[in-house]
Image (cartoon, rainbow, N blue to C red):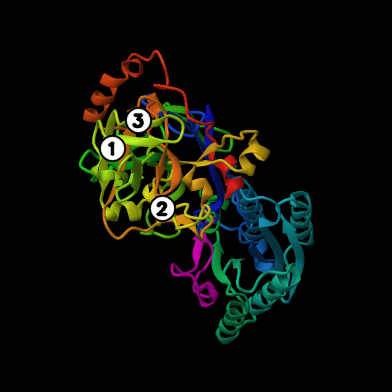
Amino acid sequence: MTTDVQTVTDVEIDPDSNNPTSFDMTSTLYLLDDGSADDDGFQLSVDLQGSDSDHDRIDVAVVIDTSGSTADSSGSDFTGDGHDETILEAELIAALEVFDSYVDAGYEGDEVVISLVTFSSDADDRGYYTLDDRDDFVAMLEQIQQDGPGGQTDFDDGLEAAEDAFDAAGANPDGTNIVLFMSDGYPTQSSDYDIRHAAGDLEDSYNAVIHGIGIGENSSLSKLNLLDNTASGAVQVNTGEELTQIIVEPLTDADFLRFEIEIEGVDENGDPMTQKITLEEDNPAVVKTSLGWSVNKLEIDPNFAAPQDLTVTVNGIFAEDPADKGSGEQVITTVHNIPLCICFTAGVMILTPTGEVAIETLKVGDRVITRDHGVQAIRWIGATTLPVGYVNRTSSMRPILIRKDALGPDQPVRDMRVSRQHRILVRDWRADLLFGEPDGVLVPALSLVNDSTIREDHPTEDVTYIHMAFDGHEVVFADGVEAESFHPSERTVAGLSAAQRVELFALFPELEDGSVTHAFDAARPHLKGREGRVLA
């Protein structure tokens, strides 16, 4: 068994939210040793893992009124102990609840920086604190409590000090900057003009969102509305929880919905066909892990009649970014190609005792010259035509174009096209030196691609792929190139149409009863794709 592993990394989900997450997804197909699938299908595993992306830092300036009037009752019981706190006590309780709510919401370290500012007749910057600095933050609140109320109420000084606090904390002027301006709402030495002017300067300098917060039932909002620049205006709060509900936005979690697996091929008429498998998040096959979600060796049994390559697309799907309404579901994708098609294309000239003959004109019983066993009669021949549009949309179905003389003089004698997995006999010094096979090795055409004389073709008309089989696996002369005939096996026969399978099982019944995996031995050793690439 071999595996085909596809990985995408650092795909950001919820990029516009307050908690973008970077995801890696690895999908693995478990295939036959030659990298293909057989009649039993294949297995699929998926591992989707996330890690937090860097959050934009949030700076919060908590501005606390410490004027003489804050010794008065707030008119509200902020702690629920049956007694109304003073305005200053309530402000300090609310400030600590804001700090703790950011932690509870999932923010960490310096993702949030909280500055403390106090004001009365003048204002003081009391320092800035990350979420790791709770003890220092609490100590400063206790110091403010100790200092106690006193002095006049100067709103504009408090606003100017908030701007200074952002400066000291290193806030990003274009970042998320929030001001919580708490007071009883009765300035005693600030004019309306001064309040509006100071608030305007703060907004201009730091793009700040300024919340006017009236503390307790006894507070007034009319002057706080002069500085508040939110859509709802200044608000009165009676508990710390009311304040945090307004200010603290919980971190969003990436909302995983499902895995979708799409297997693309063509039907018996050559028309595009897709098999879709959906695994919702609650499907037993989907396992929640500590870092994301996974699927372990899901059995998949595709049933596509035509001999062809299959494209397997694995999608991990999340709900839309909550901060970008209408943007649609978010998708992480990996893509695999499974080879099933090993054929010549129409127009290839096959050497026969009477000369070169176009492969599409050959029929059962016609004789062909082989390298190892002379003249051999065709036992079976089959063809499938694929629409040009489908071939060009599906890279795994595009033929490989081998230009005249690409493999040596008159090899081929003219441009030729074969399927990607059709094997070409390479029998020169490289086969002997690199692989110890002086009689040569069979190499998939795709492995020989050099993007010059051998490259992927983009046809302009429908593509007909043609198989032909003999009593053994033969090397034939196609456009002067030594190439393999069809090698019936469980895998290759499983990819044929029902009618073609019946014909081949009649010739090689041992394949149908499962007693053998191949109708006969290979003409030469087969190289895997990665091995063959050293010959390109």
Q: Quadrant of residue 315?
A: top left
Res. 135 visible in picture: yes
> Is residue 233 within the magenta segment?
yes
First of labels 3, 1 by sequence position: 1
Q: Answer left or right for 215 relative to 508.
A: right
The residue located at (35%, 15%) in the rendering is 510
* Residue farthest to the bottom, as pictured: 193
Tell me: residue 468, above or below residue 69: above
**Residue range corresponding to the magenta coloring:** 218-237
* In this view, the mark in front (2 or 1): 1
Observer-nearest of 21 and 488: 488
Residue indicated by mark 1: 306
Q: Is residue 127 above or below residue 23?
A: below
Binning the other alpha carbons within 10 Å of mark 1 as few (below 14), some (14 to 19) or many (20 upward) gives many
Q: Residues within 10 Å of mark 2 (few under 14, many from 20)?
A: some
Q: Identify the residue at horizontal 31%, vertical 16% (top origin).
A: 509
Between disc 3 and disc 1, the foreground one is: 3
Quarter of the image for residue 494 reads top left
Mark 2–mark 1 Cα distance, whole angstroms, equals 38 Å
Measured as percent of width and height from the top left, residue 535 is found at 59, 47
The disc placed on residue 320 is 2
Considering only vertical position in the picture, is 187 above or below 527?
below
Residue at position x 68%, y 39% in the image = 433
Q: Which residue is mark 3?
A: 376
Image coords of residue 80 (percent x, y): 57, 43
State which mark lies toward you, 3 or 2. 3
- Tag 2: amino acid: Glu
Name which residue type carries label 1: Ala
